[in-house]
Amino acid sequence: MLSGAVGKYHRHLDYVNEVLGRRTGVRNLAAMNAIITPKGTLFLCDTYVNQNPTAHQLAEMTVLAADEIRRFGMVPKVALLSHSNFGSSEADEAIKMREALQLIEDRDPSLEVEGEMHGDAALNEEIRSRIFPNSQLEGEANLLIMPTLDAANIAFNLLKTVTDAVSIGPILLGVSRPAHILTPSVTVRGIVNLTALASVEAAMAASESED
């Protein structure tokens, strides 16, 4: 199911949550956008759902987003972004990201994740290695987890515009069935991209139910 090309995102979200509900074990839905740039593909979370997510919500959405990225045939490399760089600030937002790191590691020890860090450290291994040589993250991050919805949404729209990138999303994470909510600014190409993703998810779900 796709909706949202007309109307407010959260009104559609309320209906999806009420009618379809969340996957077993999922406490909160989240939204992720992908942008395909000349330098590679980036995924950003949470761009539309959780205004100021807690550490637990950040951990849950990170694991959900990582699973979705694996469906693209990619290995998720996660950076928890902040104005703080590896403990340089004791602000609540920075502490939240550090707490989220511990929760993510408990949920999925195999996931390559590091934080909290600046955006340049996430996308440049040389900068990251100089600041934090013991980082668990190798190479460039491809999943950027933001501390707030404002940060994620602003970053996504800036990157999409400046790089003239192809965008996919918003990808709704955690819903019980393949369902995504578009935004009124979506292009025809954006609808086609998200339709393709939803179709693959539906086929996978049908295959799993048969097994």
Image (cartoon, grey):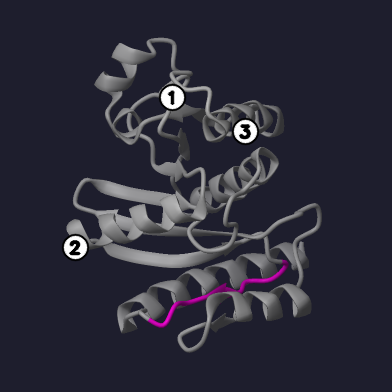
Q: Amino acid at mark 2?
A: Asp
- In the rendered structure, which disc, 3 or 1, sits on the residue that comes first in sequence? 3
- Horizontal and vertical percent position of residue 187: 32, 81
- In the rendered structure, which disc, 2 or 3, sits on the residue that comes first in sequence? 3
Label 2 or label 3, whichever lies nearer to me, is: 3
Label 3 or label 1, whichever lies nearer to me, is: 3
**CA separation, marks 3 and 1?**
16 Å
Q: Amino acid at mark 1?
A: Leu
**CA separation, marks 2 and 1?**
27 Å
Q: Residue at x 39, y 13 (%)?
A: 132
Q: Is residue 81 left or right of residue 12?
A: left
Residue 36 lies, with reference to residue 147, above or below; the image says: below
The total of numbered circles placed on residues is 3
Please say if the residues under marks 2 and 3 sit with CB atoms less than 8 Å apart: no
Q: Which residue is mark 1?
A: 137
Mark 2 secondary-structure assignment: loop
**CA separation, marks 2 and 3?**
32 Å
Q: Amino acid at mark 3?
A: Ala
Residue 68 is inside the magenta segment:
no
Q: Which residue is mark 2?
A: 164
Please say if the residues under marks 3 and 1 sit with CB atoms less than 8 Å apart: no
Q: Residues within 10 Å of mark 3 (few under 14, many from 20)?
A: many
Furthest residue toward front:
91
On the rendered image, what quadrant is the N terminus found in?
bottom right
Q: Which residues are magenta?
A: 176-184
On the rendered image, what quadrant is the C terminus found in?
bottom right
Q: Which residue is mark 3?
A: 100
Q: Residues within 10 Å of mark 2 (few under 14, many from 20)?
A: few
Q: Residue at x 51, y 87 (%)?
A: 7
